[in-house]
Image (cartoon, rainbow, N blue to C red):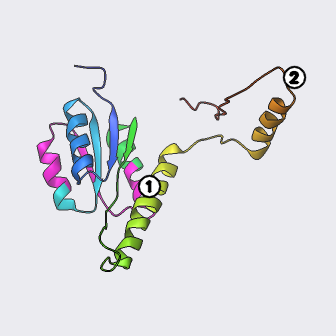
């Protein structure tokens, strides 16, 4: 068994090409999976192809409750979440003369709003940085002597790993 066995991955958008391929790869590497997509039937079919424990949460990422359901499923079924593969999205393309603007707006809601909701839910930083924290760092940089150069600086909340 490799070192990834036992880890848990949540995959939003698991029923499409990239999401399904990632689910199969991670499942094959020993990850336990929480799979998400809009089609329960496609999720069930995917789960039968993967020889790994899976939980399925069918739902549209435009629904504000879905990201919380994904995290809850990981915690309830596997007691942890190590990876969130934020892959949910749809694609609407075509010439400007014929493209369906309502589908383009739907694409923006799923691809942007859905991605933000998932990221926000899974980041869950217990002690986020405050504006005052950033101001102290700015002042620190500006207070350095002229010969001191700080070309890059990363500020992270406590416990946040790179």
Tell us which disc is closer to us: 2 or 1. Answer: 2
In this view, the residue in front, 151 or 6, is 151
Q: Disc 2 designates what residue?
A: 145
Element under label 1? helix
Element under label 2? loop
Which residue is drawn at the image coordinates 22% and 50% (left, top)?
17
Residue 6 position (above or below residue 114): above
**Residue 117 at what x, y percent from top left?**
48, 56
Quarter-of-image position of residue 157: top right
**Residue 81 at what x, y percent from top left?**
40, 38
Gap between marks 2 and 1 measured at Cα: 42 Å
Which residue is drawn at the image coordinates 47% and 62% (left, top)?
113
In this view, the residue in front, 154 or 29, is 154
Quarter-of-image position of residue 156: top right
Q: Disc 1 designates what residue?
A: 115
- The tag earlier along the polypeptide, 2 or 1, is 1
Q: Assess disc 2: are there few (<14), some (14-19) or many (≥20) residues with their C-alpha within 10 Å of its C-alpha.
A: few
Residue 65 lies in magenta, yes or no? Answer: yes
């Amino acid at each position: 068994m490799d070192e990834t066995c036992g880890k848990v991955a949540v995959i939003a958008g698991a029923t499409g090409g990239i999401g399904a391929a990632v689910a199969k790869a991670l499942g094959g590497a020993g990850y336990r999976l929480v799979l998400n997509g809009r089609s329960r039937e496609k999720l069930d079919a995917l789960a039968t192809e993967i020889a790994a424990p899976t939980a399925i949460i069918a739902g549209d990422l435009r629904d504000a409750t879905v990201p919380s359901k994904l995290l809850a499923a990981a915690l309830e079924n596997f007691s942890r979440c190590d990876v969130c593969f934020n892959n949910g999205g749809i694609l609407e393309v075509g010439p400007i003369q014929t493209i369906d603007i309502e589908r383009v707006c739907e694409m923006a809601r799923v691809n942007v709003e859905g991605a933000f909701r998932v990221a926000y839910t899974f980041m869950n930083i217990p002690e986020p940085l405050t504006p005052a924290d950033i101001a102290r760092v700015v002042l620190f940089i500006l207070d350095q002597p002229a010969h001191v150069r700080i070309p890059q600086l990363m500020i992270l909340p406590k416990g946040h790993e790179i």
